[in-house]
Amino acid sequence: MSINIEGTFVSQKINKIRWIPEEYVETKHFFTGSWDDDENSVKVWTFESVHDDENVENPRELSEYKVAGDVTEIKLTDKNKIAVSLSNGEVRLLEISAYERNSPLREIYTWSKLHHINSERCSCTALDTFEGDIVTVGEDEKVNILNGRRGDVTRSISDTDSCSIHSVCFLKLNEVITGNLRGHMKIWDIKRDSNKPVASFHFPGEEVAATCIVQHPTQPHIILAGSECGSLAVWDLRMNKFPTSQLSAHSSGVTEMQFHPENPNKLITCSLYGDVWDWNMESLTKKSGDSYVPLDDKATMNVTSLIPTLHKAVNSIHCSKGRVLCAADNEAIYLIKNLKY
């Protein structure tokens, strides 16, 4: 079957979109987080068939949880809980009913003023989750570790950088990697008392922000970062001083990346230009360090465009089997169906 794309206007710029995992059945429910609105929100949606036509699905809003500030990230902490970061420096842990998806989201914890410069709040720019723990980064150069089970802050690392941090990823329980506005990548051991990173390296080329970071799902020593100029860099953390590969990818900033949860050789990326691309990453993720080949052009890779270029930012993507959700600044949600994986 060929790829099918369905777009729906939702009257909000959507900054983050996430499938809600389901057991035993194909998921139809998802979260969205808005930005640049008078009043932003986290919403729960479901897809419904139109007029008994199972080939056409429209999203229907089930519930809304209003927030003060832009939603900057949504990550699952388990199958029914999400951590939500906001541009006012807050992080909230919210729960959705396992049985009634249309029930309002329930607030479990709120961490207020996590990120601030002097007395002024500043944005919590990104977060990641690992087995109930949450790491947050922000414009105040701070890294916070939150315990999602107890609701406390277990560690704060201050003065980590000379500029704001824009991306973060858990490497393992006690290690996180951050990327800042100047492209500095740093690895932190969150169990150590020291405020110094255990490793640091730099995005190649001119100083560009590292906008997103992902870890390879089956080879945890491999890290990919996207930049504000649209390039992708690949590091092998066993020899991390220089990237093993760099790809001239999108024509503008990479907004999000995700390895397909069932195919570690498939990477989905999106950009500020409105692209959504499907990459075959097998040649970049070989197990032998000697077999890496530097690449400087995406033409060397097997890259497929999944939707026509929107010319407005696609801010977020999320894969589940053969279905990909896309959220854009044109106030629309897109469902890509029949993706081969």
Image: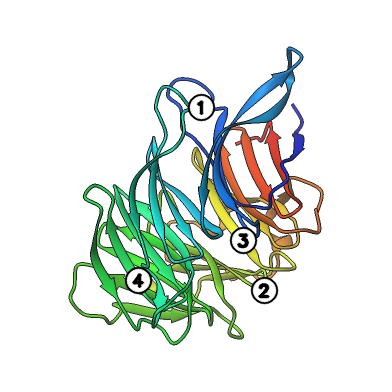
- Give the left or right position of residue 113, taking residue 149 as reference: right
Q: In the rendering, at what x and y percent does residue 211 appear?
A: 56, 68
| Tag 4: amino acid | Val
Q: CA distance from mark 1 to mark 4?
A: 34 Å
> Residue at 63% of width from left, 72% of height from top?
228
Q: Vertical placement of 5 versus 240: above or below?
A: above
For marks 3 and 1, give the CA distance: 29 Å
Any part of residue 241 in sight? no
Please tell me which residue lies in front, 12 or 246.
12
Whole-percent x, y for residue 54 in the image: 71, 17
Q: Which mark is residue 143?
A: 4
Q: Nearer the viewer, residue 242 or 139?
A: 139
Q: Which residue position is annotated with label 1?
A: 102
- Spatial distance from mark 3 to mark 4, Cα to Cα? 21 Å
Real-space Cα distance between discs 3 and 2? 10 Å
Answer few, some or many: residues within 10 Å of disc 1's Cα (few below 14, many 20 plus, some between 14 and 19). Answer: some
Between label 1 and label 2, give the one nearer the viewer. 1
Pair 3/4: label in front: 4
Instruction: Report which residue position mark 2 lands on.
Output: 229
Lower sequence index among marks 2 and 4: 4
Residue 278 location (% of width, % of height): 66, 49
Q: Are marks 1 and 2 in contact (CB under 8 Å)?
A: no
Tell me the element at label 1. Answer: loop
Tag 4 or tag 1, which sits nearer the N-term?
1
Give the residue drawn at x 48%, y 27%.
Answer: 101
**Amino acid bearing label 3:** Thr
Residue 332 placement (x, y as % from top left):
73, 45
Q: Tell me which residue sits at (46%, 28%) in the image.
A: 103
Cα separation between marks 1 and 2: 40 Å
Amino acid type indicated by mark 1: Asn
Q: Residue beneath label 3, please?
A: 255
